[in-house]
Image: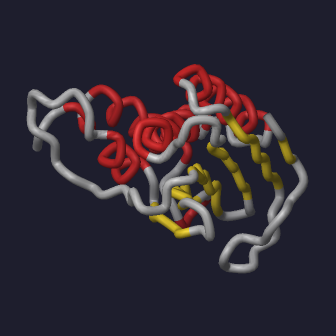
Amino acid sequence: MNATHAPQQPPPEGEPVLQEDRLDYTPTAGSVRLARRRAVRLVGEWGWAGLPGSAGLLVSELATNALLHGCLRDRLFRVRLQLTATTLRIEVSDPCGERLPRLRLPEDDECFGRGLLIVAELADRWGVEPRSVGKTVWAELLLGPMGRTAERHETQALSSHTHHGFQRP
């Protein structure tokens, strides 16, 4: 695993990066747990006490999707967190660019297929960016008056996990 803590690249709007973390993970289920725990810890350490649960859930869902649909044997996936004054951006990159995620409404009896519904409900924005090899799926939580408040994110993270993502509307 390789970690980077220094700002590497400005966010799309050119806003200065205050904090950044990147870590490459092996394509195993245990890596999803490690990535989620790391995100929760870092977001709390960065001073956003109301956002660790939301960040952890977003990392967990995006990393699980990368593991199930985008990873190849012996090819790592990357989780990147980037904090600016207005945005917490979470990115998960994997080596399979031909398998793009799509939002869908699963049947009631399906065990899988709700991860992006949770991401779409929880994040202020999300999307996919192609890479020269693979793709990056990202989600953003807007901070302050432009986005949802930290308290709303925490409440929504809990309700998305227990209600919105697991039943048909």
Res. 106 in view:
yes
Residue sitting farthest toward the top = 30
Image quadrant containing the N terminus: top right
Q: Return the residue nearer the eye: 27 or 4.
A: 27
Q: Position of residue 111 (x, y in %)?
A: 22, 27
Query: 29 above or below 156?
Result: above
Q: How does the figure colour the protein chain or chains? A: secondary structure
Q: Position of residue 108 (x, y in %)?
A: 9, 32
Residue drawn where x is 50% and y is 54% of the image: 96
Residue sitting farthest toward the bottom = 13
Residue drawn where x is 62% and y is 56% of the image: 89
Query: 120 above or below 33?
Result: below
Image quadrant containing the C terminus: top left
Q: Position of residue 52 (x, y in %)?
A: 61, 35
Q: Return the residue nearer the eye: 82 or 158.
A: 82
Q: Quadrant of residue 109?
A: top left
Q: Position of residue 49 (x, y in %)?
A: 67, 35
Residue drawn where x is 26% and y is 33% of the image: 112
Query: 9 above or below 104?
Result: below
Q: Return the residue nearer the eye: 164 or 59.
A: 59
Res. 151 in view:
no
Residue drawn where x is 51% and y is 57% of the image: 137
Residue sitting farthest toward the front = 73
Q: How many marks?
A: 0
